[in-house]
Image (cartoon, helix red, strand yellow):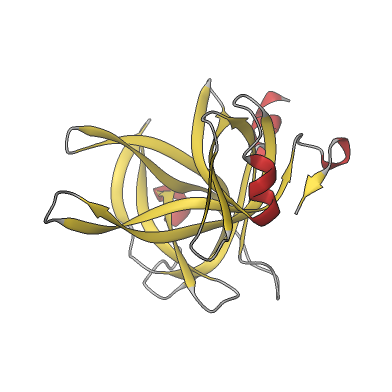
Amino acid sequence: MEKNTISANNKVFLSGTVETEPAYSHELFGEGFYELSLRVPRLSNQNDFVPLTVSERLLAGRNVSIGAPLALHGQFRSFNKIVDDKSKLMLTVFVRDFCTPESGENPNRAELSGYICKPPIYRTTPFNREICDLLLAVNRAYNKSDYIPCIAWGRNARFVHTVEVGQKLAVSGRIQSREYVKKLSETESETRVAYELSINKISLNETADEEEVYE
């Protein structure tokens, strides 16, 4: 029962095309894992480039060359990686299985249930668009948690910025990639990519019937 509950806390479906060929990442309990990037289309005709982690056993016999179509179910996960002697939060979709998408299906869906673990950050853009950033701790098996950055817009942002740390939320939306410029010094900067869940629905409990839902 616990295993099923934890799995329901973190569900992702993606459908797109392979952007980078698999590269070996690590081995765990004798099983090799690879990383690759998936190009996932948006309705706006732009694309998100989502990092995947997948077992060599799932890759066996499957076409994962650049440009190949790929659809999958998985979980949005985080891990810490040492970069320049600092711990950096890394995000990836851990592939559970590959599947065949249905015609007209939304190619980018994620559903998470977890706890707000940092005070939400509310702000407005120069065009007065409301935005709120939050960090959601999503439980995983073996007493682990994934820490997933989420971003809410409009009245979702107005609602969630007043929610206290420790509050349990269920959110759904899409995984998005976003480029930003990181200033390294007075004269140096570099372009980096952030990954986050762009929220389109929030409820204060896992079951939407129990609390008002904000869409």
Residue drawn at the location 18% of the way across and 49% of the way down:
184
Which sits in the foreground, 60 or 140? 140
Which sits in the foreground, 84 or 130? 130
Residue drawn at the location 61% of the way across and 66% of the way down:
107
Residue at the left extreme, as displayed: 187
Asked if residue 60 can be seen in this view, the reply is: no
Which quarter of the picture shows residue 87?
top left
In the displayed structure image, the side of residue 175 where residue 85 appears, left or right: left
Rendered location of residue 214, percent (x, y): 76, 49
Residue at the top extreme, as displayed: 143
Residue at the bottom extreme, as displayed: 45
Which sits in the foreground, 59 or 155? 155
In the displayed structure image, the side of residue 142 where residue 212 appears, left or right: right
Residue at the right extreme, as displayed: 209
Which quarter of the picture shows residue 64?
bottom left
Rendered location of residue 45, percent (x, y): 53, 79
Which quarter of the picture shows residue 8?
top right
In the displayed structure image, the side of residue 122 where residue 87 appears, left or right: left
Residue drawn at the location 14% of the way across and 49% of the way down:
185
Asked if residue 180 can be seen in this view, the reply is: yes
Quadrant location, the C terminus = bottom right
Rendered location of residue 86, percent (x, y): 23, 33
